[in-house]
Amino acid sequence: MYMLTVALLWGSIGWSRDQTYCVGGFNGKPPKLTSTACNTPAVRQLHSAWHHHTYLFKDGVCYDCWDEVDNSCITDFLRNHPDFSEIRGRRCEAQHNAHEIIDHRIQGQPIQELQPRIDPPPPGPQEAGEALTLTGRVTNRDGDPFPVDGGRFIVETPDGAIEEVVGTPQPDGSVVGTIIVPDADDVQVTFIPNGFPGPQDAGGRLPLDVRRKPGFSLPETLDFGTIAAGALLSETCVALDLSESIGLEERAFQVSVAGLGGCLSAPHLAPSRSLKTPIIVESPGDSMMVCLAVPYCAGETAPADASLVITPTDPRFLDRAARVPMRWTVTNRSWLACHGIWLFPLLALVGVGGVIVGIVRPKRFPPEATITIASDPKGLKRSAPTRLRECRGARPGFYRDAQLGIHFDGSVNGRLRGAAARLLAVDNGVALIAQGALEVYDRRKRAWKTPEMEDGPLMPSPREVYRCGDVCFQIDPG
């Protein structure tokens, strides 16, 4: 660090300057010294006509004083440090304090209080490849400028590359230089005022926040593998690895597809943004999820030229566009697997409809239809009619019209086996079907006769009287 602070003053040195001196320790016994603090290469190169002037003494310890062509060791240092006195070298004991510097000044400025620095550049990140103007300066402990007559800006990158830019001195004592921002991470810029031995001990160091030029490192292919037709979009997603790419942060890119031709499958950016039209993506990060919408039933193979294309939206970097081939195979499904999704519900719907029809379609007896039963025709006048719907078993069944049996004991119910006749609900009322000997009373001849039933069941009239065995009945179809 001492070498750093010492070196900063080289640019402002003249051939002779008042208050320019160095007082420090030494190793050895005068006049045979092995080393002295004030004549190291780092100190000596800051002075012209630099020479040993005298020895100084304090508290039993000798020190070596050097100055230029003037008499600063006596006129300046001793005047400012009355606790020191001049001494002849042969009176000094052997010393081993060459590591110690008591006071080193140039034109009255204590050099250990001077520091180089670089003014902060505009807020980053800085664009790789752009010209960036930097200002270096040297200040004392109070922040006051210490003018220098020039300096260098050393630009370093992690791969060991070093670029040196010579700065231009300014009237205010600062130095201005323009560098080209490298396309690299962790860029360091060091300001070295004139006379400083090299960048290894630099003090005015500035790290640059560099936004690198975009560069893609993509896999050889984006392979979706083998996918069954009809797969959900979320089941087909594949991560496109961008982790080895550089300069993607805080940049926008256009993502599109090419070479799809007339294929049925359609790439999407997760979760569901179709790439049929290009999509703008901001700062994609380490990966992008790409999904494939596949046909519902049909199979296909990706076209040979199918690819995903990523292009920077900044026109300066259009040449950095990259593409990755896309590969997939979609397997078709069987006819049943493909159409079952609507076939089975349709069958279920038909079944439900069949149940509904089986319940609704059967015919019912008219609400006002009645039957009157007696043992002889005269008794019918005294008997009360019974509504057919009120008879036990008069309700229709599943796909079965309402039916009632007229039995030889005069009962009417839904039991048909052994019945003398059968009543059947029809569209226009009630039909009568004989299951045994059925007769109808002929009022004109006053005699019973067998009714004519060539055209199917009888459609009874409320005026007609029927007989089956010993049971007489009249039917009013309502």
Image (cartoon, helix red, strand yellow):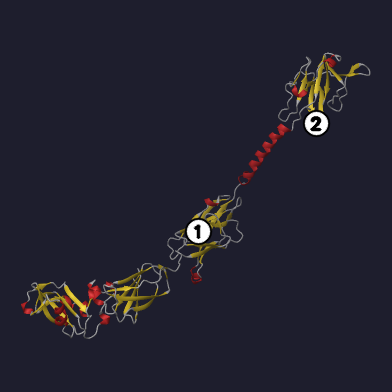
Q: How many marks?
A: 2
Residue 112 image-quadrant placement: bottom left
Camera-nearest residue between 7 and 375:
7
**Residue 186 is drawn in which quadrant?**
bottom left
Q: Is residue 286 visible?
A: yes
Q: Quadrant of residue 213?
A: bottom left
- Which residue does the numbered mark 2 point to in the structure image? 427
Relative image position of residue 271 (x, y in whole percent) = 52, 54
Q: Mark 1 = which residue? A: 222
Residue 469 visible (yes or no): no
Q: Position of residue 365 (x, y in %)?
A: 77, 27
- N-terminal of the pair, mark 2 or mark 1, is 1
User: What is the secondary structure assignment of the residue under circle 2?
Assistant: loop
Instruction: Report the mark closest to the observer, 2 or 1.
Output: 2
| 203 sits to left or right of 44 | right
Give the vertical position of 106 relative to 260 (above or below): below
Quadrant location of the N terminus in the rendered image: bottom left
Q: Amino acid at mark 1?
A: Leu
Q: Mark 2: give few (<14), some (14-19) or many (20+) Cα within 10 Å.
A: few
Q: Which residue is located at x 91 percent, y 16 percent? A: 447
